[in-house]
Image (spheres, rainbow, N blue to C red):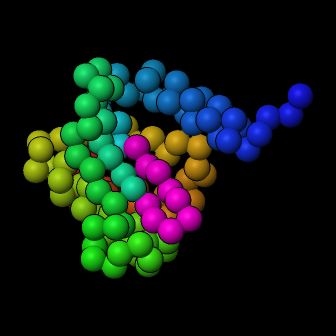
Amino acid sequence: MALSPRESAQRRAQRNRTRLKKVGQGRPRLSVFRSDKNIYAQIIDDSKGVTLAAASSLEDGKGKTGGSNKDAAAKVGKLIAERALKAKITDVVFDRGSYVYHGRVKALADAAREAGLKF
């Protein structure tokens, strides 16, 4: 029986997180969610189950449009890095979820690295 697209994405994301648990023990996870119109990022402490910092393309004042490009993703990456550094978080593990490390996801990661996060 074939899997639905949602089930396939969930399996890809779970595979990715399983690898991250082996590599980044003790480090918080920078999780990315990409929708058609916006992009969201949050830093999660999995041991406590708490979100330490969050940012999204909805915050820049553009409303629900204009967050679906690489520039918006780079702004979110810079914003999440600033908030992480303010919370004294420097090392994270990058969780791309089920998304390919390309385009908006890559732009967010590169901007976060340039702003001072290490992963």
Q: Is residue 80 above or below residue 46?
A: below
Point out residue 59 in the picture as x, y percentages from the top left corner. Answer: 28, 67
Quadrant showing the C terminus = top left
Residue 2 location in percent, x, y? 86, 34
Q: Residue at x 89, y 28 (%)?
A: 1
Q: Is residue 51 magenta?
A: no
Q: Position of residue 87 (x, y in %)?
A: 12, 44
Q: Residue at x 49, y 45 (%)?
A: 96
Asked if residue 30 can be seen in this view, the reply is: yes
In this rendering, would 63 be left or right of 1?
Answer: left
Q: Does residue 54 appear left or right of residue 109 in this picture?
A: left
Asked if residue 84 is positioned above or below residue 82 in the image, the reply reads above
Q: Is residue 114 visible?
A: no
Q: Quadrant of residue 110?
A: bottom left
In percent of the image, x 57 and y 36: which residue is there?
A: 13
Q: Residue at x 50, y 30 (%)?
A: 17
Q: Nearest the camera: 7 or 116?
A: 7
Q: Find the magenta span and give its range.
A: 31-39
**11 relative to 73, above or below:** above
The one nearer the camera, 93 or 43, is 43
Q: Is residue 38 magenta?
A: yes
Question: Which residue is most to the right?
Answer: 1
